[in-house]
Image (spheres, rainbow, N blue to C red):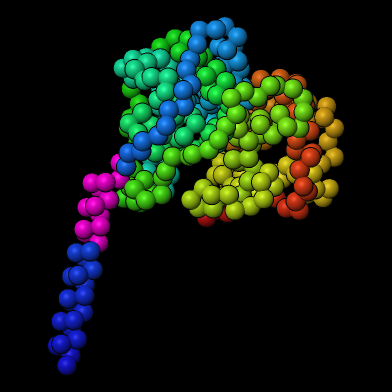
Amino acid sequence: MKKKLIKQIIRSCVILIMMVSVSLIYVQLSYKKEFSLKETGIRSSRDSTLITRGQYLVMGPSHCWTCHTSSGIKNFQTSAHTSLSGGLKVELPFGTIYTPNITPDSETGIGAYSDEQLARAIRHSVKHDNTAMVPFMTFNTMSDYDISAIISYLRSIKPVKNRVPATELNILGKVVARFALKPVLTEAPKYVKPDTTAAYGQYLAVSVANCVGCHTLRGKTGEFIGSQFAGGYQMPVKGGVFATPNLTPDAKTGVIASWTVNDFIGRFAAGETFPDSPMPWKSFQSFKKEDLKALYYFLQSLEPVKNDVQPFIPTAPE
């Protein structure tokens, strides 16, 4: 009886190992899943007005330059503007990602990519090889005009030859890529007119500056699990963990609830006050005052959410 039980256990283990092995082989061979999407129709232009708009977005509210350079967190706070040649190393539980070179170099940058390929990356989070990318930033609902502006600006800058290492996914990352990563399919406006209204502020907060992406509590796979703009999302920084503040107008726990519009504008002008903050203050100091007014009016229009966030949790001594 005992021998029979042992044989059954061994047989079950062998079957389990075979099933796991087959599954891993399947994932290894199929994780680069390709997607076919309808064309966005978004194209670049040499129009100076459009290029100027793109420069403002890339270097300011959309803070592209803070990540698309190897110096990383330094750019968030104090560094001078550098090239967009990529190379920032981001280590995640499912692998190591390197930000791409987005200068128009034809060998190592975006010079060989079509406007449509670049537009799909921003609008649908799909790479040039038709595979889905990790959706770090929520630019998917940016207007056609602003995506065109960004591409137009990137086409106009100096090419920089910098070959960035390929992203390295571990087995968990490959499982996520095979079964979880998908294109972001969403509707977006053709054009949004800049003004100082709360409606335009919402567009800035959600589609342009990614305020919602950081100031909302997320789960382990990146999905929103908290009230939007109520803060609490934790990010590791030097010496501990930084938690994003509550931006809703809750009288007790909302950090800007009692601020005037001039207080809000002044805070952005001041830049970094918390060392190693993940907030891209250097870029956000380029925000136009009119845009900051719109952003302020939108945040003040939100439903108050009570969420008392401890902004910094120091690492416990070993």
Residue shown at 34%/17% (left/top)? 112
> In the drawing, does residue 130 fall left or right of residue 272?
left
Residue 32 x/y as whole percent: 30, 41
Front-most of residues 183 and 67: 183
* Left or right: 18 as drawn, with respect to 316: left
In percent of width and height, residue 101 lies at: 40, 22
**Is residue 227 depicted above or below 143 in this figure?**
below
Front position in the image: 168 or 57: 57
Magenta residue check for 121:
no
* Image side of residue 27 versus residue 114, left or right: left
Magenta residues (range):
20-32
**Most distant residue in the bottom direction:** 1
Q: Is residue 6 above or below residue 158?
A: below
Q: Position of residue 302 (x, y in %)?
A: 76, 43
- The residue at the point 82 percent across, 50 percent down is 252
Specify the principal SS of the magenta part: helix
Closer to the camera, 200 or 295?
200
Regarding residue 20, the answer to whether it shows in the image is yes
